[in-house]
Image (tube, rainbow, N blue to C red):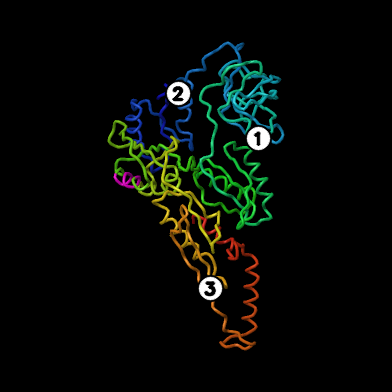
Amino acid sequence: IEKNLVIIPAINKIDLPSAMIEKTKRQLINFLGISESEILLISAKTGLGVESLMSEIIKKIPPPRLINEEKKTLALIFDSYYDQHRGVVAFVRIFQGKLQKGDRVKLYHSQTEFIVDETGYFLSDLTPTDALKVGEIGYVITKLKDIQQVRVGDTIHNVQDIGSGLAGYKKVKPMVFASLFPVDPNEYLNLKKALSRLALNDASLSYSPIYSQALGAGFRVGFLGLLHAEIVQERLEREFDLNLVLTTPQVEFKVENNKVYEPIVKITIITPKDYLSAIMNLVLQYRSKFINMNNFSSSEELILTYEMPMSELFSDFFDNLKSVSSGYASLDWEFLNYQEVDAGKLEILINGNSVEEFSMMIIREKAYFEAQKLLARLRELIPRQQFEVRLQAKFMGKIIASERIPPFRKNVLIKSGKVLGTGDIGRKRKLIERQKEGKKRLKMIGHVEVPKEAFIKIFNKN
């Protein structure tokens, strides 16, 4: 609406028994200010009404504005993927001029030059054509080997043309960071290859190698959000047969002149009015700031707008929102800015040694609660040693919580080769030997034996 675009309202999945067609019609009428006769009813599954929808698209959406093809070329990249034989294949819309095989062109923002190897349309497959002209959408084969150079939103223009690119380009920046380790250290090289292959088709994915005393070699990975992190982990495990440990994703805080700044987002929640009270009570628990509320000019749907710290949004907020709204509320967000916050680094110490994998940036008011929760979990997961294990949480230089794992007592079942209790001595010795073998699989942090399974369980949401 803001861009003055043509909107064709359509209600899909009308074949479902649970379809609320009349209610949805009223929502569209109130939201778009249209008449009921303009709304199309379709079922993409059965094909009902799809032909009418296509006819409306052809009739109502205007063709591209014709511009002289002799003008300098401006083509917008709206998607891309990597082909191992032909390099990066860019999907483009021609706003001005034309593109054809043999053209020497340049990417405006990345300043990368290449010669167009092929142009074509999207039919049943990629179908070559002599040229892509103004107003047309198609693909360009670049033969470039690095998809990071061909970013969505960049502009393709002729090398000899000097000018500005198409407006609206914004480089995608990772908003959430986590560490990724293979459960089997021997799989490190396979993980590296898998990440490099994913990055070819996902320009928003960034990673760099790190080393953990507890988990070995791995990677620090940047994601767009929690969903992106989950998708990447699932693809790595499913497509590349890897067993991975993903540490708790965290947003990036900025530290400047001994002051800490956290990223703030604007969230927009659309919900039926019945859930308004529950949602407003929920949002208050996440350090949010109310901005406004609109009602679509109807009494059924409400739009709530808040400012919220990104760390709160990327915790369990979305799951709780779906829970209190019975799944009917929808959520959208956009980054706003960085704001100063009273926060610091929470460190976990095991017998005085800091464990970086468990460290995190956290606001002061939540530090004690998170420290207590994490130490209690670690106390359950770390097996008893032959000596006392002290677990401590340090925040901004002070110990704010502690736990203790008592040592094993002396084994009095076997003494001088004689059994003091009941049972077979051979079986007991066999169990002790098996216990020794199990200890070999434990990861060492200082002098405390911490099983890798503890890291897997503490970072596993389930």
Give the secondary structure at mark 3.
Answer: loop
Are discs 1 and 2 less than 8 Å apart at CB?
no
Which-is-in-front pick, marks 2 and 3? Answer: 3
Magenta stretch: give its range: 277-283
Depth check, front residue: 418 or 322: 418
The residue carrying mark 1 is: 82
**279 within the magenta span:** yes
Q: Where does the image place residue 147, in percent across and percent down from the top left?
A: 64, 33
Q: Is residue 56 above or below residue 354?
A: above
Which secondary structure is most common in the magenta stretch? helix
Depth check, front residue: 71 or 247: 247
Number of numbered discs visible in the structure rendering: 3
Which residue is located at x 53 percent, y 43 percent?
228
Q: Tell me the crowding category of disc 3: few under 14, some 14 to 19, or many 20 or more residues within 10 angstroms, Cα based.
A: few
Which residue is located at x 65 percent, y 42 percent?
196
Residue 86 left/right relative to 36: right
Q: Amino acid at mark 1?
A: Tyr
Which-is-in-front pick, marks 3 and 1? Answer: 3
Q: Amino acid at mark 3?
A: Pro
The residue carrying mark 2 is: 56
Label placed on residue 407: 3
Ranked by sequence position, the earlier of labels 1 and 2 is 2
